[in-house]
Image (cartoon, rainbow, N blue to C red):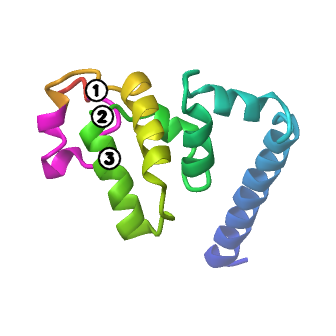
Amino acid sequence: MSRLSYSLCALVAVVALAFSSCLLYAADAPPVNGPANINAIQQLKPGKGRELVLANCMPCHSTAMIAASHQTRERWDQTITKMQKVNGLWPILPSVRSKILDYLEATQPPSDPGLEKAKETAWAAPLYRPNPIW
């Protein structure tokens, strides 16, 4: 057998091993309709307006992305506007938008006021959590 044949056999063996490992991992994973989904929704803090955030944001974002973002009310408002202009988010009634912003302002405020300035740099976009190195 040539070197190419041995290399090809080795590659096939590695791929087969990786595939079987994936199958074993998937067999141990919790069911999709089980507690994993409940935990994902519970990542957002309870509060008035949470159900509106779930209804309007969850079709495109995981709760982890929302829970990891910390912004001022103004930045949240800008984010919603950007989602509408760039990503095709549907129109939101002003009263509903206000309730969403009330919830986000109360539960997802900036963890550090200095982060708002850092978010304006190209290196920090998108910045969801403070970088301990900065």
In contact (CB < 8 Å): disc 3 and disc 2: no
Q: Is 71 colored magenta in this rendering?
A: no
Amino acid type at image mark 2: Gln
Q: Nearer the viewer, residue 17 or 41?
A: 41
Q: Estimate the spatial distance between the alpha carbons at disc 3 and disc 2, rounded to whole Å.
A: 10 Å
- Disc number lying in front (3 or 2): 3
Horizontal side of 84 relative to 60 (left or right) equals left
Q: Residue 112: image x %, image y %?
A: 22, 21
Residue at x 43%, y 67% (from the top left corner): 87
99 shown above or below 130: below
Q: Residues within 10 Å of mark 3 (few under 14, many from 20)?
A: some
What's drawn in magenta, residue-wise?
116-130
Mark 1 — residue?
Answer: 110
Q: Estimate the spatial distance between the alpha carbons at disc 1 and disc 2, rounded to whole Å.
A: 5 Å
Identify the mark at residue 77; answer none if there is no mark: 3
Q: Is 124 colored magenta in this rendering?
A: yes
Helix, strand or loop: magenta stretch:
loop
Residue at x 28%, y 51% (from the top left corner): 78
Q: Secondary structure at mark 2?
A: loop
Mark 2 — residue?
Answer: 71
